Image: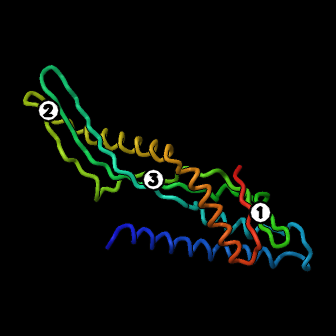
Amino acid sequence: MNPRLLWAGLLAVGLAVIGLVFGAGVLVARSMRPGGRSGIADTAAVVTQVQALSQLVTVQYVFEKVVVLDDVKWYGQNRLLMIAHGVVKAGVDLRKVTKSDVSIDGDRLRLRLPRPQLVDTYLDESRTEVLERSTGILRQFDQQMEQDARRQALESIRKAARAAGILRDAEERTRLQLNALGVAAGFRAVDVEFR
């Protein structure tokens, strides 16, 4: 099976679950609004439902990095060549959403969310491989070298994701997804701002 299709399927299922939980919380909060007049309703139910989601991951970047480590001494060289396949995920930490961050004004939902952050960075072990490992005749095998290569790969992948705009994309996708969920729950619009 194509890994991209699998990830897309998992993302779709995850968004559907988030949508159901968010929608239920919004509907409960709307039903608590007194007698049809506009104003800010009691949004505690929305906050509780949003916080239960914990983290809303909206963007995933995939990178491949080549890592070359050379440890050259006068009596020989140790060398490691690795292709690291890394995944970086970004999203919003919904545990930081408070009651004051959610307001309902008529058919408009307003959300103040924490800024997106990197949620997870890891190497896909099934696709990361050491292509070359050589040890000089007078040298001992350095067991730490592969761990150093993995750490360097992860740091390089984090920097590349930030440089490529993963946090900006996470902000944009969060707005789009929450607006779609809010409209599906009966709101005319959802205004999302980041603090």
Residue 109 position, x and y percent, is 77, 67
Q: Determine which of the numbered discs, if any, sits on residue 88 in the image.
A: 3
Residue 139 position, x and y percent, is 12, 29
The residue that appears at 56% across and 75% down in the rendered structure is: 16
For disc 2, the marked residue is 140
Q: Earlier in the sequence, mark 1 or mark 3?
A: 3
Residue 93 position, x and y percent, is 61, 56
Establish if 92 lies above or below 42: above
Cα separation, mark 3 vs mark 2, equals: 35 Å
Q: Is residue 75 left or right of residue 162?
A: left
SS at mark 1? Answer: strand
Disc 1 to disc 2: CB gap under 8 Å: no
For disc 1, the marked residue is 110
Residue that protrudes farthest toward the front in the picture: 164
The residue that appears at 19% across and 47% down in the rendered structure is: 131
SS at mark 3? Answer: strand
Q: Is residue 118 left or right of residue 6?
A: right
Tag 3: amino acid:
Val
Q: Earlier in the sequence, mark 3 or mark 2?
A: 3
Q: Residues within 10 Å of mark 2 (few under 14, many from 20)?
A: few
Cα separation, mark 1 vs mark 3, equals: 29 Å
Tag 2: amino acid:
Gln
